[in-house]
Amino acid sequence: MTDAMELPVRAPEVEAAAERLAPVLRRTPLQHSERLSELAGAPVWLKREDLQSVRSYKLRGAHLFLDSLSQAAREAGVVAASAGNHAQGVAQACRTLGIQGRIYVPGTTPRQKRERITAIGGDLVELVLIGDTFDDAAEAAADDADRTGATQVPPFDHPVIMAGQGTVALEAAEQLRSEHGRELGTMVVPVGGGGLLGGCGAWLRERSPATRIIGVEPAGAVSMSAAVRAGRPVTLHEMDRFVDGAAVRRVGAAPLRMVQAIAPELVAVDEGAVCTQMLDLYQVEGIIAEPAGALAATAVAAGTIEHLGRAGADAPDPEEETGDIVVVVSGGNNDVSRYNEIVERSLVHEGLKHYFLVTFPQEPGALRRFLDRVLGPNDDIVLFDYIKRNNREEGPALVGLEIGDREDLEPLMARMAASNMEIERVDPENPIYRYLT
């Protein structure tokens, strides 16, 4: 473990940050979730950072960083790179403190986030779209800072940023004790570049050392796990960008040092499971969460975390309860236009939607025979698209079927086998699924 004196962030710095940020932050509520509590076997509280003024926790670190700048640095302005939420935090801080800023975001950033950045920053912030990934935006922001002398506001790789983000843990623990008379046993946080995990872990390891700390990454962007294994930040060459708020190719050096010191448990959740959880949060708790905002809750709901709410198999009493669970809902900046994709990914993940290549003879009644022989009473065709006709006698079609229950798949496959039709199931690992979802 890294020597405590060498750590980028310590608990007193997080506490000082909380005092400094108090006048500009909303003290976001802890919301009890009966659904997740039942699944976890222990009380689960949602730390609603989606209700922060910029709808994410990122304001904490961004404002603290800008507020710490010298007068000369303020006059030179700031630049930042972001997938969306950090940008909104920087924009709000620029407007509050009267600092000019330029913010670079990937062209893939959802429209809702882009519009919010410009609305929040007003005349003090210029938004620049560049590239397809956060890394493209980060490179452009770094070039800008070198060229103009502006200060670059890092999204996660800086002790001041981590100290600001760490106030989420301090605030949650205080609220749990003072408002509900409960003790924090486990804290579950989403992980992208590592600033939130590093900051929260810094405070918890010193002030609440018995607290179990769990970081949740999207399965398609496990940059922190890769860095921990390698002992240094590494660059992911392939990445699923769906969880855009946490899809980072390379974690920060300072957050990695904190993670190495606090030794949290790191788990990964499938992007399809994140979509299911986004829908559950909306339908049950009434929470509009973005993909990264649903990461931590997904790990709880999907049973990804072993012995959650219990002492663990190696403890003297494995069934002993270990305190309440706080799950950070880190952001709510989700573009409503993405919900078709979210529903699609959720259905595929839940085993309720499947795709097939069906070769139909080019003759009257071919489709009717498929309907009569193959479809069950709870099966619906949700996509039918002729791909290409190889000849005059037959033509393949891409057919999407939604079934009523995942147990209906086996009978469906049996009917297909008995139909004497040429039907090929499209494997979810097939690249065509990227197009479909």
Image: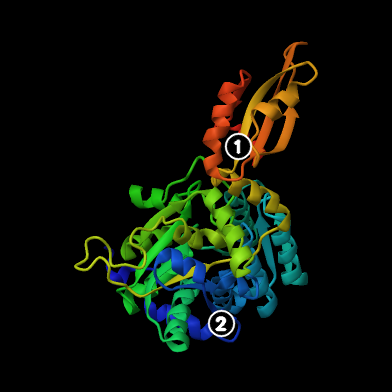
Residue 212: percent from the left, percent from the top? 34, 68
Tell me which amino acid carries mark 1. Answer: His
What residue is pinned by disc 1?
A: 354
Q: Residue lying farthest bottom?
A: 178
What residue is pinned by disc 2?
A: 27
On screen, residue 208 versus residue 350, left or right, reads: left
Tell me which amino acid carries mark 2. Answer: Arg
Quarter of the rendering occupied by the N terminus: bottom left
Pick the residue in front: 315 or 416: 416
Q: Residue lying farthest right?
A: 364
**Is residue 284 visible to the viewer in this orientation of the structure?**
yes
Quarter of the rendering occupied by the C terminus: top right
Residue 207: percent from the left, percent from the top? 34, 79
Q: Residues within 10 Å of mark 1 (few under 14, many from 20)?
A: many
Mark 1 element type: strand
- When asked about the image quadrant of residue 176, the answer is bottom left
Residue 206: percent from the left, percent from the top? 32, 76
Between the C-alphas of marks 2 and 1, the distance is 44 Å
